[in-house]
Image (cartoon, rainbow, N blue to C red):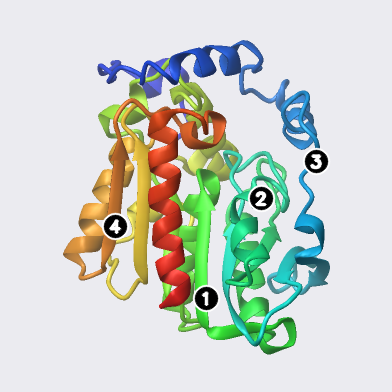
Amino acid sequence: MTGTIDDVFSDRPVRPPFDAELEPVLAAMKAGMLPMNPQNLPAIRQMAADGLPGTEPTDLTVGGAVMVDERDVPGPDGAPDITLLILRPARTAGPVPAIYYIHGGGMVIGDRRFAVELFLPYVAEGKAAVVSVEYRLAPEHPDPAPVEDCYAGLVWTAKNATAIGVDPQRLIIAGGSAGGGLAAGTALLARDRAFPALTHQVLVCPMLDDRFDDPSSRMLDGEGLWDRNDNLFGWTALLGERRGGPDVSPYAAPARAEDLAGLPRTYLDCGSADTFRDAVLRYAERLSQAGVSVDLHLWGGGFHGFDGMAPHAAISRASNATRDEFLRRALEA
């Protein structure tokens, strides 16, 4: 049920205004971006790999405070091995909690190092280890390859926790955008397969729903980041002809899960001018109704990924501080 843009989007709901401090950053970002389509995908992937112009690669060792390891571990049954990036404190008194991180990128771009620096402070301070998974990307590897890769990496982490200095009873799963959707899907798999136990899930502007049946999924067209056209491309790359139809697994599109009971305590955030806003709000409501403890934050005027793209803005500082405070409490729990 892929359809064309006109078939999928018969109307365009109104969107909230962007935060005034974010608007110049958004305009600059849009000026340097290519439209998301099959022809541009190789160039977009290269741009993501290269990072922002003028920026230096992140020192993942943080001057020696973090040990960096990469391991090829078993993937799903019958599939290739996957690579995990493992970041551990160089000095620690014992096992630490682990943040199992799943990168974003609309299901079609990114790698295990993509935005992992967000979690480096916790490792450098000796409060956590980070394990970041390199999952296969769509459209070359459609569903269920990405989420099954993520689950396989999580299982390896739990089974080998002691060997990598991690407390297997203190596993947090986290991801942003597509990575947030995959984190939610992986948490559902862990619940349904009864391994491993997770203490928290941190879902940052997550990609949860392929159906485009809410206003925010249709309100952006050439505005913001990850508009309705980009979103259609990403979901179709993952699901093909099944997108929007009845045969989509909740592990691929977690908003489709009928039962959300038994999931770990959940942090959810999103901007009010984000394509994913309504799916996030609905998911938070349903989690709460299922008895899950939920921390939900909606940031007025925020576009998709605003707090990473414009960290200087007041709204971004508030968002990042709120998420940091939640994570620090989770790591100490």
Whole-number angstrom distance, CA of label 1 to CA of label 2: 19 Å
Q: Is residue 210 in view from this perspective?
A: no
In the displayed structure image, the side of residue 20 where residue 227 appears, left or right: right
Q: Mark 3 points at which residue?
A: 57
Q: Return the disc, 3 or 4, that comes first in the chain's sequence.
A: 3
Q: Name the residue under label 1.
A: 171
Residue 233 higher or lower than 246, as above or below: above
Tell me the element at label 1.
strand
Q: Are marks 3 and 1 in contact (CB under 8 Å)?
A: no
Q: Which amino acid does label 2 sit on?
A: Glu
For the point 50% across and 24% down, the residue is 225
Whole-number angstrom distance, CA of label 1 to CA of label 4: 18 Å
Whole-number angstrom distance, CA of label 2 to CA of label 4: 23 Å
Q: Return the disc, 1 or 4, that comes first in the chain's sequence.
A: 1
Out of 64 and 209, give the one closest to the viewer.
64
Q: Where is residue 128 in the image (x, y as percent from the top left)?
A: 60, 71
Q: Return the disc, 1 or 2, that comes first in the chain's sequence.
A: 2
Camera-side mark, 3 or 1: 3
For the point 46% across and 67% down, the residue is 187
Q: Is residue 219 in view from this perspective?
A: yes
Q: Residue 295 carries which label?
A: 4
Image quadrant holding the C terminus, namely bottom left
How many neighbours does mark 2 have within 10 angstroms: few (below 14), some (14-19), or many (20 or more)?
few
Residue 187 higher or lower than 309, as above or below: below
How many neighbours does mark 1 have within 10 angstroms: few (below 14), some (14-19), or many (20 or more)?
many
Whole-number angstrom distance, CA of label 3 to CA of label 1: 28 Å
Image quadrant holding the N terminus, namely top left
Q: Where is residue 275 in the image (x, y as percent from the top left)?
A: 39, 30
Q: Name the residue under label 2.
A: 117
Residue 273 higher or lower than 66, as above or below: above
